Amino acid sequence: MTAWVTTSIGGETAIGNLGRLYARHDLINSLSGTYGLNDSDERQRTVFGFDANYMKDGQVYSEYRLSDAISSREAEAAIGLKNKWYVQEGLTLNTLFERVESLEGESDTTATAAGFGVEYLANESYKASGSLEKRWGETSDTLLGTAGIAYRYTDDITLLAKDIYSHVDYNDGHRTINRFQLGAAYRDYDSNQLDMLAKLEYRMDDNSTGTAPYQQDTTIWSWNANYHPTRPLTLSGRYAGKYTEYDADGLVSDNTAHAVYGRGLYDISERWDIGLQAGTYWNEQADDLAYLVGAEVGYSPMTNLWLSLGYNFMGFEDEDIAYDDSTQEGAYFRLRFKFDENVFKRNDPSKNQRLPRNSTL
């Protein structure tokens, strides 16, 4: 499963009936922002802002944003309006209008954005959402579209589909990125002994800017599974592969890579566990065969939260199919937190049920 993660930490405080002040810091594994169109780039973003309701389900906000704040590469101020419109039960429309002015960095001096979104949540078996946003800037214009649907086929099986499209027009060309994903999740609803996740993804990156235009097409497939034969023992496995075709200056190259690895974890007690892992990675173009061998120890300071420290005597890395730090050679640290929809239900006694610690779902 490719990395497509935004990790956030922040807080907010109300200012009487006027509105609220908020701050948030995001660590984003994508050059394209929260939508994660490019996993190879990692960015940080810090936001300070104030918002207030100017009408029912309507907000006005003002934000100060820092991208890669440690190096102070980009800073901008934004002011905008967000509205939510309830068409009927389970069907919601969202609108956005925003004005942005760059204070520091290489981005546009000023830009205007308008967006439209729709969410359908009325049916218990499936959920769907989509959005379209246009941004007009002094050096580039951007069109971003997203669409997704999740369908619960049975209590054990859920099917997912998602597409993200980005098109940017620059003065010297354009760049189009499209990312389409299909997924299937299985969880043994009755015994919670086995869970699996399979995914197929297609990425297209067409870049005509600069002196070296290119097009890259990548197909990625992956399968993850966790099996709990007994309560203290968890066996996890992953297989992933990718096929990449790269076209630049009329020269076409392709490559295939595979990664297979597994991990066994055993609970010594309610608070401590130990684990062993092993695997292999093969890259056709580089004719490279690498191995993974490592061990780790984990500690649980609270229910469903685990901290693990490990060391790999051998390891490998691939940004698409072996992106986890725990597959690289050397020391690593893992933090795992398991939750489901019951975590946020205060009066649901099932929220305290101990969940499988190593589920990929």
Image (tube, grey):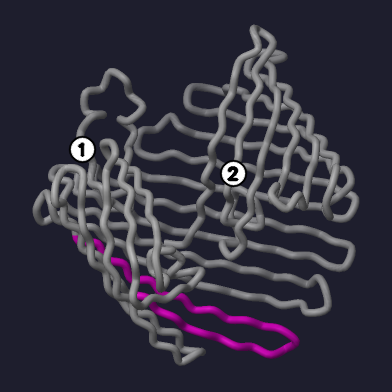
Q: Nearer the viewer, residue 242 or 15?
A: 15
Residue 253 marker? none
In the shown orientation, is residue 142 left or right of residue 247?
Answer: right
In the shown orientation, is residue 173 left or right of residue 151?
Answer: right
Q: Quadrant of the N terminus?
A: bottom left
Residue 26 marker? 2
Looking at the image, tell me whether mark 2 or mark 1 is earlier in sequence order: 2
Q: Where's residue 105, x and y in %?
A: 83, 51
Compared to residue 35, the image places residue 328 above or below, namely below
Give the extent of the magenta segment: 235-259
| Residue in view at x 14 percent, y 51 percent | 268
Q: Amino acid at mark 2?
A: Asp
Categorize mark 2 by other alpha carbons within 10 Å: few (<14), some (14-19), many (20+).
many
Q: Amino acid at mark 1?
A: Arg
Q: Nearer the viewer, residue 262 or 208?
A: 262
Compared to residue 271, the image places residue 167 above or below, namely below
Q: Where's residue 310, x and y in %?
A: 33, 62
